[in-house]
Amino acid sequence: MEEKKLDVKSIIGFILIFGILVFMMYQNAPTPEEIEAQKKAEQEQVEAEKKNSKQNEAVVTTSKDYSSTQVLDSTQRAALQNKLGAISYASTLAGSEYTTVETDVFSLKFKRKGGHLAEVKLKKFVDYDSVPVYLVKDDNSDFNITFSTTDSRTHNTKDHPFQPSVTKSGENTVVSMKLKFSETEFLEYRYELKPDDYMIDFSIKSQGLSGVFNTSQPITLDWKQKGIRHAKSISYENRYTRLTYMHDEDRVEKLSQMGDDLETVEDVEWLSYRQHFFSSILVANDKPFSKAELASENLVEDEEVDSLYTKLYTSKIPLAYNGGEVNKNLGLYYGPTDAKVLKAYDKNLQESIPFGWGIFGWINKALFIPLFGWLSSMLPYGIAIIVMTVLVKLMLSFVQYKQFLSQAKMKILKPELEAIREKYKDNKLKAQQETMALQSKAGASPLSGCLPGLMQIPVFYALFMFFPTAFDLRQKSFLWADDLSSYDSIADLPFNIPFYGDHVALFPILAAIAIFFYMKMTTGQQTAMQGPPQEGMPDMSKMMKYMIYFSPLLMLIFFNNYASGLSLYYFISNLISIGIMLVIKNYIIDEDKVLAKIEVSKSKPKKQSKFQRKMAEMMEQAEQQKQAQQRQKRKK
């Protein structure tokens, strides 16, 4: 009976509990608006889960994934974490798009996305059109690091937001750009800017990421930059725009000057993105880069169309992990391609300037650069060029004297040489033997005039390399030339002439006229001494006559787009050569005295050198063989 009562009580209790639950559910039942909001939330959750599922399958990220700067709720944080992995924290932090810093020489703009320089303006320089010189601007440069994480993702720093901070360290300004994985874990770009200095101390280092980086995969620095045009002639500027690098301690090499090129090199000390008079240089301060893949692409195919950029440079450099972290000390140089400035860093950066190879570069560095620097410190730049030209020509005047003396001797011997040719007109070999014997006795070998002339070639080529690379000439005016490092236009043409250009430069015209008269004087005298051409040999007199007109024409066309300082040098040089020749001819060399010396020399027994004896023996043997062949023909 008690059990039945207990059962009844239990049933009544359950009913009461059920009733209470029903009543509470009724009281807490959502309104129609709440039901609609819940459905919407559930639908968004489903879509988010689908999206996250797809992301986990592909593990592909884009720059849009890293652009969030708003405060996220827990659901959005979870979705972002699922999408980006360990690096998602950086995208939850707010910040401005750019950080601007100024020094005595720079105006720099650092981009939050990627942490690197979005703009580099050199405050002390302007281009040919009076616009400030920018080495980095308008997305012409990319600087980023590619790395893998332990969650099987590959990231690119250019897609991630960095957190900036600007502090002072004494007189230096320190800009820190941190890609944060948490408040204590980050990848940092640290820039230290010094007063009045174009070199930025730059370091790449990580903290607390040894468990985040996938060290089995390479971490790669990728630097791309397009050279921005700064000169009047983009083709001329492009000729001196080149990727240069130093490796194996002191070997300096370059990629192609005009075409596309690709090289993989080891032990790289520094690499320079040279843009004629300005350079962007990356220096390995602590130890050389173990390897670098370097590429250069020419962007100027048509000067009329391709007028903004000269070349595209690319460098891919693997960085080494150290204990699972990254720590690399570098230098970033953005500034003038000026030998004096670059030499001050004691890293052979001045070798990125094309002074010329071998002896030509040595002549420039040891002689012409110091000489011009000394002269230009006292004189206007145009006058300094003229004075240097005078000094060079005086230094080489003995060469012209030797040449003219040799020509005078050959002129005096001409009647005797013609008599020998006439006497042995049927025996060319014998005529040649007698001619050489006469010249040897008289001390009038043609080589004595050629060899001194060869001595001028290193000087000629060294100066050809000096003027286009002389930074001091940039935007320095003289007479009608407003920039001695560029062409001196006196007239602009409404059309473009192939190989010549769309303008008329005056200094090349003057240089061409001067070289015409100089060659007319020298070549005319040499032609007068030439006899009839030997059988099987080219007519040198005709070739010399052609050169009288061809050389000035080449000067006129080729130098129309070159530095006016170079054309000024050749103009003054040829004027001085003409003057020296007239002085030597009229006041120094007396042909009667030269003739008397020749007669004395001919009367003395001439001791032949071993080489001369050997040549004479060979010619004698050749003559005997020829006579033997002729006798055999007569017998037949």
Image (tube, rainbow, N blue to C red):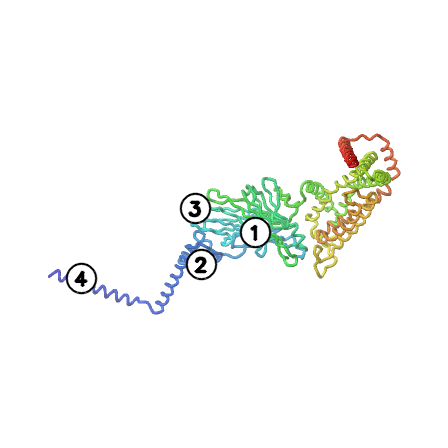
Element on which disc 1 rests: strand
Q: Residues under labels 3 and 1: Cα distance?
A: 30 Å
Residue 103 spot, x, y in % from top left: 60, 51
Q: Which residue is mark 4?
A: 10
Residue 104 visible to the viewer: no
Q: Residues under labels 2 and 4: Cα distance?
A: 54 Å
Residue 420 spot, x, y in % from top left: 84, 38
Foreground: 10 or 301?
301
Q: Residues under labels 3 and 2: Cα distance?
A: 27 Å
Q: Which residue is mark 3?
A: 211
- Marks 3 & 1, CB-CB < 8 Å contact: no
Q: Which mark is residue 71?
A: 2
Q: Which residue is mark 1?
A: 224
Foreground: 443 or 282?
443
Q: Residue at x 79, y 51 (%)?
A: 513
Type of the residue with mark 3: Gly
Which badge, 3 or 2, is on the more N-terminal residue? 2
Q: Residues under labels 1 and 4: Cα distance?
A: 82 Å
Type of the residue with mark 1: Lys
Q: Residue at x 73, y 47 (%)?
A: 376
Q: Quadrant of residue 29?
A: bottom left
Q: Residue at x 66, y 58 (%)?
A: 304
